Image (cartoon, helix red, strand yellow):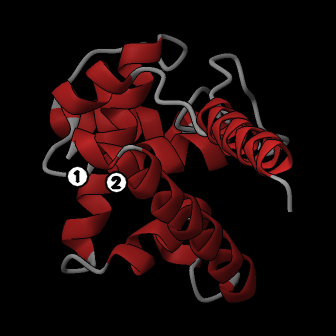
Amino acid sequence: MEKSSLKYFLAFFIFSVFVSILVLYKLFPIRYYNTVVREAQGIDPLLVMALIKVESGFREDAVSPAGAVGLMQLMPSTFSWLKERFKLEGDIHRVEDNITFGLLYLSYLLNLYNGDLEKALAAYYVGPSRVGEFEREAAAYVKKVMNYYRVYKILYFWLR
């Protein structure tokens, strides 16, 4: 290969890598990161980024067909239960409250399952009393969250 051809090839290769990385950062954002860090309850904020990506795609106004609301896709009944159990006030539609209550719920599930992240995520998805009924769906969900979590840990390694 000629020297000038090699220079163009290397320049194109470096540009392609740079663009690919930018695309990954766009696909895996860290919106609301400061709120998540503040409310993390000992949970890795990058895991929460992966969870929000899977749950709502970072759409604040997301509402699932089942009725789950917001970034963390909380069911209104779960939100009410958390408010009562932990004596807190909040609005499920307010971003900060949705994140706070979602993290509180995930923390509760982690404690319930003795720190078993996969079981806690499965319960987050289908509810603690229904994990066995929806094992296949819950397993696919957990796998997706964990795969996204790996991507977040690679892309944002310096945030740890």
Left or right position of 109 against 119: left
Please name which of the two marks, 2 or 1, marks the residue nearer to the observer.
1
Let me know if residue 143 appears in the view: yes
Q: Residue at x 71, y 35 (%)?
A: 15
Kind of residue indicated by mark 1: Ile
**Any part of residue 124 in sight:** no
Q: Which mark is residue 106?
A: 2
- Locate residue 2: give its quadrant: bottom right
Q: Position of residue 9 (x, y in %)?
A: 81, 48
Q: Can you identify the residue that label 1 sits on?
A: 43
Going from N to C along the chain, the mark reached first, 2 or 1, is: 1
Q: Amino acid at mark 2?
A: Leu
Is disc 2 in contact with disc 1, using a CB cutoff of under 8 Å? yes
Query: At x 42% / y 32%, what residue is drawn?
Result: 80
Identify the image quadrant of residue 4.
top right
Side of 159 where 2 appears, left or right:
right
Would residue 76 appear left or right of 99 to someone viewing this image? right
Q: Is 83 on the left-hand or right-hand side of 71?
A: left
Of residues 55 and 127, the one nearer the viewer is: 55
Label 2 and label 1: CA atoms lie apart by 9 Å
